[in-house]
Structure formats: structure tokens, C-alpha cells
Image (cartoon, rainbow, N blue to C red):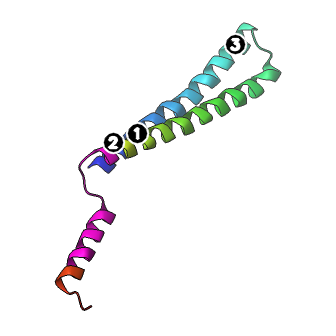
């Protein structure tokens, strides 16, 4: 359940960034229409802004992952590796000769 929430949160954030690309293109197009930006510079400006958004998207993904990892580490949930080690230790105690 937590995994689905994480996936949906990341997808939502990425969707916001993808929507930003469309808004950037619209904004730059409006600037060209108003004569505030030369049409020859439009692609360069769009590329620069989209690259900045991509960097922000990567930063957002890392931020979410780090915070979720910290939250899980602080919680009392038992991780899969911890369960495996507990079972392994218990089996060694039950069958010390093997």
C-alpha cells in the first residue's frame, strides 16, 4: 500500500513537471506573438527552460525518495532483510548442528 502511494505521488509530481513543458511552450509562444522574444530564439529559450524543469524533476524525485526512506527507517516496520535474518537466526538456534 505504501509503495502504491509512493508511485502515485511520484507520478503526480512528474505529471506536474510534464504539464510545465506545455505551459513553457505556450508562454514562449505568447512572448513571440507579443514581440517580446524573437522567433529564432524561441526554441533555445524553450530548451533551456525545459532543461531546468528536468533538473527540478530529478531533484523532486530524489527528495521524495530520500524522505520516504527516512520515514521508513524511523518507523517500526520490519524490513524484508531483517525478517530473513531473524528467521535464519531462529533456524540456527533450533538446529545448531546444521
Please indicate whether residue 62 sits to the left or right of residue 78 in the image. Answer: right
Q: Between disc 3 and disc 2, whose residue precedes?
A: 3
Chain part drawn in magenta = 72-91
Residue on which disc 2 sits: 71
Residue at x-position 29% and y-position 47%:
2
Quadrant in which residue 30 is drawn: top right
Say whether marks 3 and 2 touch (CB < 8 Å): no
Instruction: Give how far apart the Cα atoms at labels 1 and 3 are.
Output: 38 Å
| Rendered-image quadrant of the C terminus | bottom left
Residue on which disc 3 sits: 31
Instruction: Give how far apart the Cα atoms at labels 3 and 2 are.
Output: 44 Å
The kind of secondary structure the magenta stretch mainly shows is helix
The label shown at residue 67 is 1
Q: Nearer the viewer, residue 10 or 21?
A: 10
Residue at disc 3, secondary structure:
helix
Residue 78 within the magenta-colored segment of the rendering: yes
* Position of residue 44 measured from the top left corner of the image (x, y, whole percent): 77, 27
Quadrant in which residue 50 is drawn: top right
Residue at x-position 50% and y-position 41%:
62
Q: Nearer the viewer, residue 36 or 55?
A: 55
* Position of residue 81 measured from the top left corner of the image (x, y, whole percent): 33, 65
Amino acid at each position: 500500500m505504501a509503495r502504491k502511494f509512493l508511485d502515485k505521488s511520484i507520478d503526480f509530481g512528474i505529471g506536474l513537471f510534464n504539464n510545465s513543458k506545455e505551459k513553457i511552450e505556450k508562454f514562449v509562444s505568447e512572448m513571440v506573438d507579443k514581440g517580446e522574444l524573437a522567433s529564432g530564439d524561441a526554441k533555445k529559450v524553450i530548451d533551456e527552460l525545459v532543461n531546468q524543469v528536468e533538473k527540478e524533476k530529478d531533484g523532486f524525485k530524489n527528495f521524495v525518495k530520500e524522505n520516504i526512506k527516512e520515514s521508513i527507517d524511523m518507523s517500526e516496520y520490519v524490513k524484508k532483510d531483517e525478517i530473513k535474518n531473524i528467521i535464519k537466526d531462529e533456524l540456527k538456534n533450533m538446529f545448531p548442528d546444521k
